[in-house]
Image (spheres, rainbow, N blue to C red):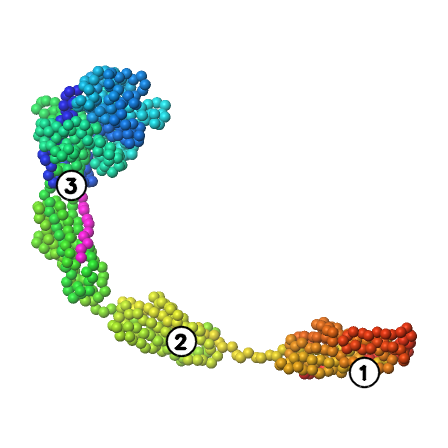
Amino acid sequence: MTALVALCATFLPQVSSPGARADVPCAEDALTTRFDRSLTNDELIRYSAHIVQNGEVVYDGTGGGQPASARIWSGSKWLTSATILRLQELGMLDITAPISTYLPAGTVFYGSNGSITLEQLLSHTSGLNEALLPSGVSDPALLAAPLLAGAPQFAAGAQFLYMNGDYEVAAYIGQLVVQSATGAATLPSWDSVFHTYIGDPLGMTATTFSYNALGRGTAAAGATSTSADYGKFLAAILANDGSLLTPASIASMKTPRISWSPAAASARGQSGTIGYGLGVWLNDYNNDGVADAYNSAGMGGGVASWGFIDTLSNAYGMIMGTPSTQSGTASSSKTFIDLAGNIVGILREPCPVGNFNVTKTVSGAGSSLVPAATTFTVNYSYNNVGTPVTGTLSVKNGETKGLTALPTGTVVTLSEAAPTPIAGVVYGTPVFSGSGVTVSGSSATFTIGDGTTVNVGLENPTTLAPPTLGSFDVTKTVTGTGSGLVPATTGFTVNYSYDNAGAPVSGTLSVKNGETKGLTDLPKGTIVTLSEATPTPVTDVTYGEPVFSGNGVTVSGSSATFTIGDDTTVHVSLENPTTKTPPPPVVVDHFGDFEVTKKVTGNGSSLVPATTRFSVKYSYQKSGKVVSGSLAVKNGETQGLANIPTGTIVTLSEAKPSAVTGVSFGTPVFSGSGVTVTETGAKVTIGDGTTVKVSLENPTKATPPGTSTTTFSPTGLAVTGSTGVGILVGIGALLALAGGALVMRRKRYRKV
């Protein structure tokens, strides 16, 4: 174990103080050469490596038949330390608490071993006796028991001693707190704990933990991985963005738990000091107490691994392999340490680089029309260690832009994208120039020097573009029911107006139905407004509002506007909808009639002479004046008035009949459809082309002489006073007249 401790304590690369950060292509070439040489120089039998710098893979390869997956030995400790710190972040444990807090009741502790902390276990300052770690035992409880029950080598925290037993006890505590937190019935394996909290979130599918009999444990030296899969863990540590652990946890991991050792660094030919944090070796090249590089190395069974992060070159990587022999002696760590030092040295070694600039100028008659904000796109391309790289520079007139830190010898090709068109400007072929610049057609090439800048001139010659002209035309159509009445020779006047270089221009076009007329040679961009004069009247034709239409035509009210294009014609349609004017309406008066039919009834009717006329009075309003008169109608006769305006209300009443001997007239009775009886007579309303038929009945009674009679009441109310004698006389008179002549009905009308 002493040899292993010595190996790990010195397993840090021999590098000088760092210089400028290397450029990726330069590093990739050098790394390829160095790994190839490791095989030919009998340093390594086989290897695999995955190295990333500035976020780009600078080396990923294998040699000598190295299997992709292999045991990484003490490289396991970094993974185990990160897992314990993650459990602390989740509140399952505290690395500063005594380990007795988390171990099962009944655990046997020697002396103050129960007061050891997880922090001391992870930093190899616990003092536990590594010699007590049993062989051939994979059960974590059985691995931990003899260490905890045995006498320590020194008091906890008193000194540093690199050992596997510390990490087996720490992992056992991690398994216990996860079982407690999850309520699992059995103790979870360390592999499952690692994958749940570290491996799976990082996608480390090729990394597993298993018991390592030679290393006498699982968590300290039992991990198997690939260089690329372990690189996922290193990337998360370097990023320090919370994807793996909080920045506070990573800072704790990188804080040395033993004093920085200048002597240890000097013994390895290094500047600065060496220290140890939680699961990781630390280098402080600047002697400022802050780790500049950190790694976790492992070796056993003839194979070695070295996972590292170098902040000074912004790189990380994992190298795995089998060292060969040197000078007939087992190389142990020597060749691997030398190789590791060379790798970091390559990553820190500055490459010879150079730059290039492009200065843009716009020249010629059209240059003043090019806005100062106009950008021109310059395309560049070159090969980066066999990988094509392309991009663009956006540069304005009078501006200089370029790229820096390109590897010396890089051949760059430039071309220019077609400039954005500008009205009135014609661009010529771009002209590249400059020392060391070779022009071929529309592109230029040059080679990057060492620490120099290639200055490229790029001129865009311009000329003024000839004015561009366009036109418009108007096509007239007359539509609608009145279109056939519009003479073919009828001209319609279309007004136009526009602005020509600040001067207003206006005029007219005279266009017939079906005809097209317009203007040509108008400058592009001219805005034209059209309207139509009122058409010349045409008999029996009514014009509607004119309708403008067409692609690009904007209508507003009775006018239309459009913009003249470049060598194009704006086609405007102008429709005049029409209707045929209807003839003047024929005024038709609406009239109606009314008629009155006289009927004398009762036992006195036969005594009334047939020639007796009854006077029927009428009255109505016509044109604001009262029209009145009377009809003389005999019994059985019909008379009336014709051609009375529809809607007229006619009032009817009857004058008192002439006296007839032996006859008493009762109240006249008006009746009929549409007849309204009033106190004084009746009212009718004249219809349209119809006749209101009014019946007028005069009830009578025969009265003998000297007998009281019922008298006529013009209000329609009868006055009675007959006696029984009178009634008998009346009946006799009626019987005497029973054979009287039939009174014929006659109809006679009077027009008004």
Foreground tag (1 vs 3)? 1
Q: In the rendered image, which quarter contains the C terminus?
A: bottom right
The amino acid sitting under disc 3 is Val
Sooner in the amino-acid sequence: mark 1 or mark 3: 3
Sooner in the amino-acid sequence: mark 2 or mark 1: 2
Q: Check disc 2 and report its element: helix, strand or loop.
A: loop
Cα separation, mark 2 vs mark 1, equals 83 Å
Residue under the image location 20 percent in, 59 percent down: 373
Question: Where residue 544 appears, x then y in whole percent?
Answer: 44, 73
Question: Where residue 154 appears, x then y in whole percent?
Answer: 18, 19
| Dot 2 and dot 1 residues touching (CB under 8 Å) | no
Residue under the image location 17 percent in, 64 percent down: 367
Q: Which mark is residue 658?
A: 1
The amino acid sitting under disc 1 is Ser
The amino acid sitting under disc 2 is Asn
Up the image or down, 564 lies above or below 609; here it is: above
Instruction: State the image quarter where residue 747 is shown.
Output: bottom right
Question: Where residue 71 appears, x then y in whole percent?
Answer: 22, 26
Cα separation, mark 2 vs mark 3, equals 78 Å
Q: The magenta stretch spans which residues? A: 387-396
Q: Check disc 3 and report its element: helix, strand or loop.
A: helix
For residue 723: magenta?
A: no
Cα separation, mark 1 vs mark 3, equals 143 Å
Q: Which mark is residue 513?
A: 2
Q: Nearer the viewer, residue 5 or 553?
A: 5
Residue 13 is at least partly visible in this image? yes
Q: Specify whether 548 is left or right of 77.
A: right
